[in-house]
Image: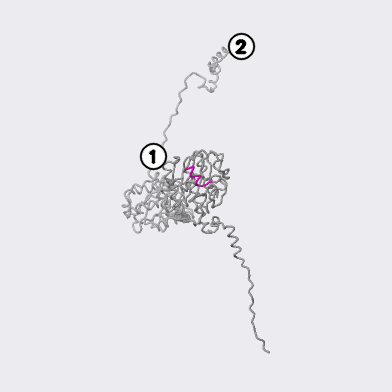
Amino acid sequence: MVRKRLLVPGLFSGLLFANVEPPLPEWNAEERSRMVEDGWLAGGSLLTYEPLPAEEQAEETPLAVDEPTLEELAEAEAEENIVDEGYLAAYFEEKPEHYLVDPQGLLGTKELQDLQAFLDYHAGDASIDMYIYVFDGDQQIPGDVREEEVVERLYSVGKPAVVAYYYLGAPQRSEIYLSPIITDAVSAAEQRRALKSSVVQAFASVDPAEQLEAFLVQMSIRIYWMERMTEGTAAETMEAIPDGDGVRKFRGKKAATDGDGALPDWMGLAGGVSASVVGGLLLFWSGLMWWKSRARFRFPEFEIEPRLGGSHAAGIGAVISFCSSAVPPARQRDQVPDYMRRA
Amino acid sequence: MKCPRCVQRIHRAAAACPHCGFGLADADRMFGDGEVKLRSLTDAAGLFRRSERDRIEDALESFGTSFPQMFVAVYSGSLGETGNLRQFGFWLLNRGIFEDVDVSKPNEGGVLIVIDPDSKAAGISFGYLLDPFFEERDSFECLSRAHSYWLEGRYCDGLLKVLNHLGKLLRKRCRQAKRDPEKYERKVATPVAVEDLVKKIRGGNVPTVRQPVPHEDKEVEW
């Protein structure tokens, strides 16, 4: 009992003492002065109530450097990755023989062949060709090369074309130009949309070659719409083709025509055969039901002597009781007279 | 062939049951000796609703179309404590005139289904046309189809099951009868009397009579 009386005050006193913090340590004056004289006071700015001394900022003396000249600035630009002069002729001098222009050999052999085959297929299927000039991702076309001028010079004659300058690994830097003959028919907005959607499709992959492939596929699709525009058969709504789902839907449609994702022939044949078999069975069943409905059954008539005085009938069949489920028909096979059967 | 009262076997041409003496006259005493006009579907017990009556009448008509010689009649009503179903069926098929049945179909081609909801029993009776082709066990099979439905009070469904099975069975018998009619004819052929049988046998044995051999008279020349 005594312990319990002391317990509560003891707990309260403990809590009180717990809230009281011990005092911070303070410098002994003699020790402090001695350490200051020595030149270094450990934690001198911490264990003291004196304000922190203001930091002394060293005075900066400006460098005596001349401003860069124009030549120096040009040299700095020259350090960027610009297409070597040796390749410029291959790129821009003449109309290329192949639809994929990669004189720098940025693409692998197989990738080059695959993309070339795709572009050849596109050319055979479309009325607007697609030429792709491949550059490195951080390369710059020399300033003296004007892309528009190249297109006008090389692609004004012959089959109309879409010329794309593609930067491998950086599709967002790509640019497209149209042959002058179709520039008026295809609005700038549509050109921007085509480029934007192709770039978006390219970013679906991280591999530069796959990006280029996706870019080309999407551009091929957009060229199809450009063809419709140039033919004048495109509706006004085609101008507002969304870059998102609408394009993907078309792509799916085009993929279906190309055979990608389409049902195999054998499935179509199997479906047709199944439908014909089911139809045949239904027809047969209908005919059978009709025949059955029209069937007539006649019994041979024999001379029957009357029985029990009945001039028409004396045939007695079974009598079955359904008063209880405990008496199923199986237990009623032995027929008994009516007077021996009770309800 | 069985007696409607004692359910004992009787001769096919018996004028009265040799066991209990039952005859049509006994049935007339029980149910009346005059002709009774009724329809093929007589629901005296009120078992069927209007829609069910339509269904049953359609089934009866379909049966009559498939079997031009026959018709099916259904009677529901209370027949007393003992439920003289067989006797009532025998009497009704001989005394009943079914107004909605074509005159070309006599009661010999009738099949009567009697349902007694009070005694919870049902039976089948049939005319002379089906005597060679329809047996007691066939009618038992037909009624068994309806047992579970009638237990639950679903009289219409049960009756349709009976009609359906009856039709199947009769179609089968009809085909069998066409293939081998003699088999069924033997069942109902009039038995030959014993005396006639002896005459028949004896008429086949003709005794031989000796004929005299003629002699020729000839003169002998010396």
Residue type, numbered disc 1: Glu
Whether residue A103 can be seen here: no
In the image, taking residue A3 as reference, residue A83 lies left or right, namely: left
Percent x, y for residue A191? 35, 49
Magenta-drawn stretch, dominant element (helix, strand or loop): helix
Q: How many marks?
A: 2
What kind of residue is marked 2? Arg
Q: Which residue is mark 2?
A: A3
Residue B166: give x, y in percent of width and height.
50, 49
Q: Nearer the viewer, residue A52 or A342?
A: A342
| Residue B29 forms part of the magenta stretch | yes
Label 1 environment density (alpha carbons within 10 Å; few <14, some 14–19, many ≥20) = few
Dot 2 crowding, Cα within 10 Å, few <14, some 14–19, many 20+: few
Percent position of residue A315, x then y = 52, 49
Query: Does residue B150 show up magenta in the picture?
Result: no
Callout 2: chain: A
Element type where label 2 sits in the image: helix
Check disc 1 and report the residue beneath it: A67
Q: Is residue B140 above or below residue A129?
A: above
Q: Is residue A77 left or right of residue B146?
A: left
Give a yes or no on whether discs 2 and 1 share a subunit.
yes
- What residue is at 49 percent from the left and 18 percent from the top? A49
In depth, the one of A234 and A315 nearer the eye is A315
Which residue extends farthest top? Answer: A2
Looking at the image, can residue B7 be seen? yes
- On the image, which quarter does residue B204 sit in? bottom right
Q: Which residues are magenta?
A: B22-31
Query: Is B178 positioned to the left or the right of A132 in the image?
Result: right
In what quadrant of the picture does the C terminus of chain B appear? bottom right
From the image, state whether disc 2 or disc 1 is nearer to you: 2
| Mark closer to the chain start, 2 or 1 | 2
